[in-house]
Image (tube, helix red, strand yellow):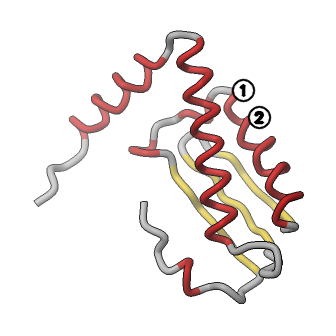
């Protein structure tokens, strides 16, 4: 997914962010995966010194409102790290439990439902 202009927002402090899972896969129906996301938010909150004003985790995406301190990192840095490490941890769990087939099948089914790109 593109950054949608986040690189232009280097001095901004307040953000409302929505980020989705690829193909809107409802991965956050699993409590363990929600806990991984929250753990990563807390870890990077300490690293980048941002403040979470509120958040909600939906089955295929999450929304949050935060205050970023540009002295410690940008919104792009925060989102990159949270999304990357959350995905890696979830894939590790799926691999350990031999459930990677679940995601492959789900992504294949979702591709069939999406309209063809021109």
Secondary structure, mark 2, is helix
Number of other residues with Cα within 10 Å of mark 1, as a class: few under 14, some 14 to 19, many 20 or more? few
> Measured from the top left, where is residue 3 in percent x and y?
48, 70
Q: Is residue 33 left or right of residue 48?
A: left
Label 2 with label 1: CB-CB less than 8 Å: yes
Q: On the image, which quarter does residue 102 sit in?
A: top left
Q: What residue is shown with label 2? A: 35
Q: Which mark is residue 43?
A: none
Up/down of 108 relative to 9, above or below: above
Quadrant of the frame with the C terminus: bottom left
For the point 71% across and 89% down, the residue is: 11
Q: Residue furthest left?
A: 118
Number of other residues with Cα within 10 Å of mark 2, as a class: few under 14, some 14 to 19, many 20 or more? few
Q: What residue is shown with label 1? A: 32
Foreground of the two, 22 or 74: 74
Foreground of the two, 77 or 90: 77
Q: Is residue 113 left or right of residue 66?
A: left
Q: On the image, which quarter does residue 54 sit in?
A: bottom right
Foreground of the two, 112 or 7: 7
């Amino acid at each position: 997914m593109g950054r949608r202009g986040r690189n232009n927002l280097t001095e901004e402090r307040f953000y409302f962010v929505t980020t989705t899972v690829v193909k809107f896969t409802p991965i956050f129906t699993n409590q363990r995966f929600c806990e991984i996301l929250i753990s990563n938010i807390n870890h990077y909150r300490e690293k980048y010194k941002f403040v979470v004003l509120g958040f909600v985790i939906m089955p295929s995406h999450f929304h949050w409102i935060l205050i970023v301190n540009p002295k410690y990192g940008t919104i792009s840095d925060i989102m990159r790290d949270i999304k990357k490490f959350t995905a890696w941890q979830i894939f590790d769990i799926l691999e350990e439990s031999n459930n990677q087939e679940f995601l492959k099948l789900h992504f294949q089914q979702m591709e069939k439902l999406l309209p063809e790109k021109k």
